[in-house]
């Protein structure tokens, strides 16, 4: 490990990463720093370069250009060592469905050549709430419990960095909340987490959000900072007829989005004058007030601006 890496406050510190597949540039000039114990959210449309970046960070892909360190190790020269000290959880469940919870975790412990495997596996099952399912086949677990098993396997060897690639896709809201409680507990103990997600409630639980488009970081900061940097203006109304109003507003100049949330109508755009003209042209007794933009508004605005699709 270099003296510079040893002195760095960052678990991830990479500069100008580039990766292409044939003629397609997937990651182009990406620079990223993530501090110890930070939960950093990766947002962006499908194909924006999130998964490719994560795989370069954990040593599964070698960059075409750029340089940097991950957990103090060079991402190009020391990729095999990085893989030994990083946990990587993919969206697809990738463990043996015909083995029990214990057998899956015991196999992972053997791969990492962990000392006192039985105790390590028992400890992680207790922490993840899996002890009562020790002898259940992985293939018989629900989506939420499969997710817990995958997370347990990823942190069993006590990694310094956890990379999560849309880990909660397809599980219910309660399972997602419980998963994130576990993540925050581990981050509080010093684990660094980089997580890609399309769920805005999850993005808001991250200390910092990094938004990618076309392989580049276009904005980063806390949820509030990202919202304020977007330049998005939002108005909210309540009252009768909000569904009809939403349908009408979507076709008017200056309106980027008009969405109904329960009994409220949320309208967003970047041209204040055009937006105000649009909402005042709607008949009815709706009461409008300006409100801070939701992170979902900002995400959709950025997808539209960059030509991506969620």
Image (cartoon, rainbow, N blue to C red):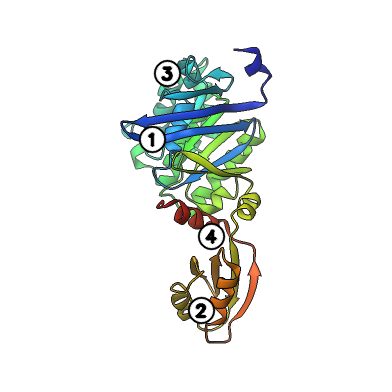
Image x and y of residue 23, in percent: 32, 33
Q: Is residue 138 left or right of residue 118?
A: left
Q: Secondary structure at mark 1?
A: strand
- Circle count: 4
Q: Which residue is mark 3?
A: 111
From the viewer's perspective, is the residue at label 3 or at label 4 nearer? Answer: 4
Image x and y of residue 123, in percent: 55, 28
Bin the neighbour count of mark 1 within 10 Å (Cα to Cα): few under 14, some 14-19, many 20 and up. Answer: few
Whether label 2 touches label 3, CB < 8 Å: no
Quarter-wise, where is residue 25 in the image?
Answer: top left
Bin the neighbour count of mark 2 within 10 Å (Cα to Cα): few under 14, some 14-19, many 20 and up. Answer: many
Bin the neighbour count of mark 4 within 10 Å (Cα to Cα): few under 14, some 14-19, many 20 and up. Answer: many
From the viewer's perspective, is the residue at label 2 or at label 1 nearer? Answer: 1
Distance between the alpha carbons at the discs numbered 3 and 4: 44 Å
- Along the line of sight, which residue is nearer the eye, 272 or 106? 272
From the viewer's perspective, is the residue at label 2 or at label 3 nearer? Answer: 2
Asked whether the viewer can see residue 89, the reply is no
Distance between the alpha carbons at the discs numbered 2 and 4: 18 Å
Q: Which residue is mark 2?
A: 242
From the viewer's perspective, is the residue at label 3 or at label 1 nearer? Answer: 1
Q: Secondary structure at mark 4?
A: helix
Q: Is residue 61 left or right of residue 297?
A: left
Q: Earlier along the polypeptide chain: callout 2 or callout 3?
A: 3
């Amino acid at each position: 490990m270099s003296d510079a890496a040893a002195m760095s406050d960052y678990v991830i510190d990479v500069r100008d990463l580039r990766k292409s597949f044939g003629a397609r540039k997937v990651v182009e000039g990406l620079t990223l720093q993530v501090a110890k114990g930070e939960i950093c959210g990766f947002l962006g449309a499908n194909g924006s370069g999130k998964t490719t970046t994560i795989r370069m960070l954990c040593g599964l892909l070698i960059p075409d250009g750029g340089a940097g360190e991950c957990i103090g190790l060079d991402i190009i020269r020391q990729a095999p060592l990085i893989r030994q000290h990083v946990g990587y959880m993919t969206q697809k469940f990738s463990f043996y469905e015909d083995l029990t919870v214990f057998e899956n975790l015991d196999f992972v412990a053997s791969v990492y050549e962990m000392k006192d495997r039985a105790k390590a596996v028992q400890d992680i099952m207790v922490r993840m709430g899996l002890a009562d399912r020790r002898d259940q086949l992985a293939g018989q677990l629900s989506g939420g419990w499969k997710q817990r098993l995958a997370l347990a396997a990823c942190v069993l060897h006590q990694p310094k960095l956890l990379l999560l690639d849309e880990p909660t896709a397809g599980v219910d809201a309660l399972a997602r909340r419980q998963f994130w409680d576990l993540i925050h507990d581990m981050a509080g103990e010093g684990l660094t987490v980089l997580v890609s997600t399309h769920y805005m409630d999850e993005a808001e639980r991250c200390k910092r959000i990094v938004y990618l488009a076309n392989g580049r970081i276009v904005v980063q900061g806390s949820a509030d900072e990202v919202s304020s940097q977007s330049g998005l203006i939002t108005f909210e109304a309540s009252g009768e007829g909000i569904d009809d109003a939403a349908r009408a507003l979507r076709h008017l100049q200056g309106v980027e989005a008009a969405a109904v949330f329960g009994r409220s109508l949320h309208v967003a755009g970047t041209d204040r004058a055009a937006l105000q003209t649009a909402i005042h042209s709607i008949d009815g007794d709706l009461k409008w007030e300006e409100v801070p933009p939701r992170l979902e508004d900002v995400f959709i605005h950025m997808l539209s601006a960059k030509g991506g699709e969620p």
